[in-house]
Image: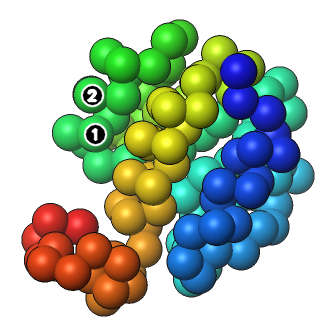
Amino acid sequence: MVTESELRERALALPAVAEGSHFGMPAFAVQGSGFASISKDGWLQLRLGAADVEEAVRQLPEAEPVLRKGAPIGVAAPLAVLTTAQLDRWLPTSWADRAPAALVRDQHPGTSAVDS
């Protein structure tokens, strides 16, 4: 089980992340681009690319795709059922999906802009 404080600690440890709010929910953004938020009912929402959404839905218990105009833009899952290993897998992926390509490259040398 992952707590909100564990999520906050891990999110803020990522480069260029700031905590704010999104519709009154705790939210995290990398250089102004939101990548994670927690709903009032304890669901973690992560922004992910379409391929990662499919994989995350297969791997995360009770995960649901988040859609915008019918297209997948992320996943939502109850924070209370996530393991630390699952959070450590998907939170940085969400961060990398929203971070500027140069920042991702700085953190992962050898990564091209196409990979991020």
Q: Residues within 10 Å of mark 2 (few under 14, many from 20)?
A: few
Q: Nearer the viewer, residue 15 or 114?
A: 15
Could you tell me which quadrant the N terminus lies in?
Answer: top right
The disc labelled 1 sits on which kind of residue? Asp
Residue named by callout 2: 55
Of residues 23 and 40, the one drawn nearer to the viewer in this rendering: 40
- Picture residue at 79% right of the left edge, 33% below the top: 3
Tell me the residue that label 1 is attached to: 52
Above or below, 43 against 80 in this view is below
Task: Check disc 1 and report its element: helix, strand or loop.
Answer: helix
Q: What's the mark number on residue 116?
A: none
Which residue is at a point 16% across and 74% down the rendered structure image? Answer: 111
Position of 27 compared to 53: left or right? right
Circles 2 and 1: CB distance less than 8 Å? Answer: yes
x, y percent for residue 92: 45, 55
- Relative vertical location of residue 51 with respect to residue 58 in this rendering, above or below: below
Kindly give the residue lying farthest to the top in the view shown: 62
- The answer to whether any part of residue 9 appears in the image is yes
Image-quadrant location for residue 112: bottom left
Q: Residues within 10 Å of mark 1 (few under 14, many from 20)?
A: some
Which is nearer the eye, 103 or 85? 85
Assign the C terminus to one quadrant of the image: bottom left
- In percent of width and height, residue 23 lies at 80, 52
**25 left or right of 95 in image:** right
